[in-house]
Structure formats: structure tokens, C-alpha cells
Amino acid sequence: MMKFRNYEEYSRHFSKLIQLEREEEMKQHREEIEKLSGEKREKLGRAVLHLNGKDVGRGLGGSYLVKFGRKSFPETEISIGDLVIVSRGKPKKDDPQGTVVEKGKNFLIVAFDKKPPRWVYGRELRLDLYANDITFQRMLEALKVFKREEFSKIRGVILGGKSPSFRPLRSKIEFLNKDLNPSQKMAVKRSLEAQELFLIHGPPGTGKTTTLVESIIQHVRKGYKVLAAADSNVAVDNLVEKLAGYGIKVVRIGNPARVSKSLLEHTLDYLVQYEESFKKSEEIWEKIDKLREEQRKYTKPTPQWRRGLSDEQIKSLARSGRSSRGVPLRRLQEMARWLELQERINALVKKARALEMNAVSKILDSAQVVCSTNSTAGSEILFGRKFDVVFIDEATQAVEPSCLIPITKGKKIVMAGDHKQLPPTILSEKAKPLEYTLFERLLDVYGENIKELLRVQYRMNEKIMEFPNKEFYGGLLMAHPSVARHTLEDFNLKLSGLEDADEWLKKSLTPAQPVSFIDTFGKCRERKRRGSTSWENPGEARIVEEIVRKLLEIGLKAEHIGVITPYDDQVDVLRRKLGKIDGLEIKSVDGYQGREKEVIVISFVRSNDRGEIGFLKDLRRLNVAITRAKRKLIMVGDSKTLSNNGVYRRLIEHVKDMGGYVDFS
Ligand SMILES: Nc1ncnc2c1ncn2[C@@H]1O[C@H](COP(=O)(O)OP(=O)(O)OP(=O)(O)O)[C@@H](O)[C@H]1O
């Protein structure tokens, strides 16, 4: 869906899709729980075994908090906000579900809405990841909030019925980064002129983030409050690092456990410690601890002891020295003391929380830029806060409702992305429309005028850039002179190591040649493992192995080499062969987005008589794969099978014209 008639249509469309996606996520977790052993799932980071459960009281909204811990806690992707299932070894249908509210080195604290069964406070328990619930809830909330009157202007633009407007700048821009190229400068200028919305289209290696950071700084200079967000923590950290490097007052919100170590000093959790009011709140928490300890000496007025007496009755009986309903006076006095202490504790907790909030507000007020993930932009820390401008990096990797979370915090939106690279991963077939990102949709609705294309890339040798440029970017890209001619010749390689190599290997590794295609037609075959939906190609894997070993032998560092293959099963095969090499990265295409390496070796895998190329058909995947290499791109594939697709056919022709085609023999 490209445009929406009204907000009801918009909100219904997206609520339904995210609901479907959430159900699919849960379903896949359930299937994996069925299929894999607990140990295997723990290894994957989606379960933790052998836990002890301990009651740690009541949480927000009266939830029941249980702390699950053990010695030597394994690495896990389970984090705050995730929905988990607790079980006694193997999860069953009606085992309790809760939300992770705290994550420590050796424990997770889970909040349950209903009182969990007694065994949850026992031993040998298991936690399983079920769904990332909090992000889902925040997307729904954003869809609700966006309906408000205050968003009418930007909402009109987002729905597709109101063209974004621009107002010419009166003064010249003093760029902080003197190295910006003309298209980057133009993007910054137009982002400042935009009144509601602007898009920065950054093909691979063109300095999307660099440009976004300059635009943020220019907006800050005008006195605007800025929120800078992205879907992934890595992308947010990247922004924080660059902004802090320019001396901008930036505050990173979000769970410190997910923030890169070197950036901890910019986190809210760190900064808050230096605030007077926070220090005071800490003193109060200590006092509260002492009072709680004292309280333990007295009888807690449980139903069993109070026998229907109200708090007031207990206190008044204790004061007047009378016993009642068979409760001994001493008990009554103890309970009264307990209640008194509880009242003091409650008052102090309130005070401590207010002081904390005060400290948090002070820091957020004084920040020039607040950085968070899209999801965390919906956390209560930012509740009620508005920003003049919201920036979203990697906007083409986030689903629209996820972008909507930060959007509901601002008045104007600047997004950076590249819709010619991979969209966000969607699990549910029915929710696939979520792959159509807000960035791409707005381009389709309003045309090229609402964006600026960054035209100079700082990564690839011009020969590597040539094909994707022609095929995906209308030939508008240029290679910056500092990279246009760089090749492996710039490295001091021991070329004598190539002399005794097979002809195909020698030819494909020629350092002066930036692109090669090794044709495996008739030599290697694709294969499917029993029960798998993925593919592998052992022959191609052997070729890749030979290439990598030779590259290392002639002096290339493992860190400089990246191996990419679209299929997970082939990733597996390659890791078995090459996984022991320290520093060598072997990943699927999806794992390589946003990254680069000196040399990239790709195994395309597909080889059959049916001319079937499966999800290689998604050309965004091809684009990402072939634009990761700086100095050398080596592709391994079956030309016959691949050529069934016009783009692949042209790619192979192109490499032939360049003299990089190699017949494997
Ligand atoms: N104007 C410039 N002059 C010199 N180098 C630049 C310029 N702009 C960007 N670069 C360099 O290009 C590289 C990519 O920049 P950045 O990290 O901003 O890119 P990106 O577009 O976000 O990356 P990707 O496309 O890989 O996601 C960096 O090494 C950066 O220093």
C-alpha cells in the first residue's frame, strides 16, 4: 500500500501486519523449542538452563518479580523487554510467560502478571525467549499516539496526501566537516530547508552516517533539540561516537548492557551518577534498605496474622494497648511497627524516585542530542518529551511502525537509508508488506524531489563499483579518487606464492584485477540437506577454501577477507572448512549489510538444470553482496543457472568484458 485515505486505514494496516509478524515470531520460537534440545537452544542464546528462581517481591502494576540466576551464566540474546517462558526443563503449553525487566551478569529478573506457580521459586528451571514484546507494544502505542492533533502536519505527509515543503535558507552554512563532498553538502543544506521531511539516499560507502551527523550538528547550531535514532544498537552507537567526536553534548539512552563499552560515558545511566539529586536519591535508597532490614524484625501483617483487621485498626489497637480477635497485643504492636516502617519506606521511595527523575530530566534538558534505538525512543524515560527534529539512520532496515516510534517524538523527520539494499527481515509470509519501508514508500509517493542522492563512494575500486552503479543507481555514482584505483597491488604481497598455483587460481587472484568471476558450470552442484529449506554447494565451498588459503599464504591478513554466501547451509559448510582461521568472517549477505572488507569472496551456491535461483532473485541481496569489497571481488557461481536472470547474465557479461572471467578447471 502506497498511500492511505485516512488514519484509520493506516493504523489498521500496520496494526494487523505487526500482529501477524509477532505471531509468526512466537510460532517459530515454539517450533524451535520443539525441535532443538535445550542445550542447543542455550548455545544459540535463546534459552538459559539450570536456573534457580527466587521471589524478589512485587513490581510495577503489582506484577510478581522472580529472579532467575545461576553461576557462570551463559551468553544470551534474551534481554530487557523480551517475553520469556519459564519451565522445568522442557517448555509446555501452559507454562508461565513473563517479561524480562532486568538483566545482570548472572541473572534475569522476570515480571509475571499473574502469580506464578510455586515451582517457579525452585531449582533446575529453564527460560526460553518467546518474543520481543516491548517493541511490539511500543509500535502499537506509536500508532495510537500518532492520531493526535499535534501530528496533523507530519501525519498528512506520512499518509501520502500532503507534499513536504521546503523553505530556502537565508544564510550560508558553515560546515563543521570540511571534507564533505558537494552531494553531501547539498543533502545537509536541503535537510535544513525541509519543513517536515527529508530523505538522504546513501548508496554503499557514500558516507550516509557522516552526512547525517553533519546535518544533526547544523540543526543543533540553530538551537533545535534533536533525537537521533536507528533500529540497531550498533547503528546508534555509531552516531553517538561520531557526534561525541565533534564535541556535541550527546546522551545515549537504553540499557547499558547493549551499549558499546567505549561509549558508556555518554549513557544516561552513567551521566546521572554525577547529578546532585541522584546522589541524594542514592542516600535515600540506602536509608530504605536499612528500614527494610529493621522491618524484617517485626511481624508482617499477613492475612493469617491480621485476621481481617485493617491497617488503621491494627495501629489504633496497638496504640490503645488492646488485643482483638485473638491476636496477642505483642503481635499487634509488632504489626503496627511494621506498618509504620512501611509508610516511611513508601514515602522515601516516592522521594527517591522523584529525585531520580529530576536528575534524568536535567541531563536530558541539557543534552543537545539524545540518541536511542527506535524502540527505546518509546520508553518511559522520554515520556512527554518532544524534539524539534528526529533523525533516523538505516531507515531502510526498519519497518514503518518501528520508525513511527521516534517520529511521534518530533515535528520534523530526516531519514537516511538505501532502498536498493536489503529491507528489514520479515518472518511471516503474510506480513511481507512490512518489507516496504517508510523511506521507499515516501519516495514512491513524492518522487525524487524529497531526497538527495549521495554520489561519491569511498569504498570500492571503480571497477567494482561499475556494475552496481549501472544496474542500481542509474550510473550516478562516482568513486572518490582516493579509492578509484586501489587494488591488492598496494599491499606488499608475496606473489611468488602464486607461481605454482593452478591456472584458474592464479588468474582469479591477479592483484591488479579488481573483479573476477569463477565459473563452476558443469563442475559443482547444489545440494539440499534432508529437512532443510536452505542450499549448499560443497564444490563451490572447496573453491572458496582454496582461494582463502592462497590469499593468506601470499600475505593477506584474515581480517581483510570476507566470505559471503546467501545460504545459511553454505555458511555452515564454509565455517566447517575455514572456521578455525582467526579473524576471517564468513556470513550470509544479510549479516554483511553496512560492512566492508578489502577482499570479498562470494559463493552463489545455486546450480541446477531448472534455472532456479531462489531468493538470489532479490536483487537487493546481490547489490549488498557485491558492494562490500574495497580492492577485490571474487565471485564463484554457475554461469548457466545464474544467467536465467537478466541481471546476473549482465553481471557475468560485464566481468567478461573486463577480463575477469575465469573458467574453473
Ligand atoms: N566527504 C568524505 N571525505 C572522505 N571520506 C569520507 C567522506 N564521507 C564519508 N567518508 C568515509 O566513507 C566511509 C563511509 O562513511 P559512513 O560510515 O558515513 O558511511 P555509510 O554510508 O553510513 O556506510 P554504509 O554505506 O557502508 O552503510 C567512512 O570511512 C568515512 O570516513
Image (spheres, grey):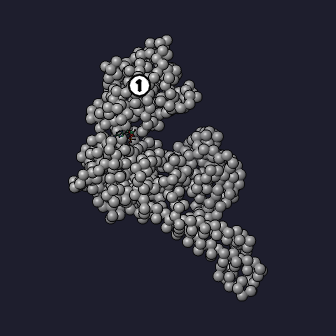
Tell me what residue is drawn at x 38 percent, y 56 percent: 226
Residue 424 falls left or right of residue 279: left
Q: Where is residue 7 in the image (x, y as percent from the top left)?
A: 33, 58
Q: Position of residue 508 (x, y in %)?
A: 42, 19
For disc 1, the marked residue is: 490
Number of marks: 1
Q: Does the residue labelled 1 lie within 8 Å of ligand 1?
A: no
Tell me what residue is drawn at x 33 percent, y 64 percent: 150
Tell me what residue is drawn at x 41 percent, y 18 percent: 510
Q: Where is residue 15 in the image (x, y as percent from the top left)?
A: 41, 54
Q: Can residue 615 be seen in this view?
A: no
Residue 219 falls left or right of residue 271: left
Q: With respect to residue 286, does 250 lie above or below?
A: above
Q: Nearer the viewer, residue 186 or 635?
A: 186
Instruction: Label 1: state its secondary structure.
Output: helix
Q: Can residue 79 be seen in this view?
A: yes
Question: In the rendered image, which quarter contains the C terminus?
Answer: top left
Residue 475 location, quadrant: top left
Q: Which of 522 and 223 is in front in this view?
A: 223
Q: Which residue lies furthest to the bottom in this view?
A: 320
Q: Which of 642 and 388 is in front in this view?
A: 388
Q: With respect to residue 399, does 572 lie above or below?
A: above
Tell me what residue is drawn at x 36 percent, y 28 percent: 461
Q: With respect to residue 459, does 245 lie above or below?
A: below
Q: With respect to residue 394, does 12 lie above or below?
A: below
Ligand 1 image-quadrant field:
top left
Q: How crowded is mark 1: few (under 14 residues within 10 Å), some or many (20 or more)?
A: few
**Could you tell me the amino acid type at mark 1?**
Asp
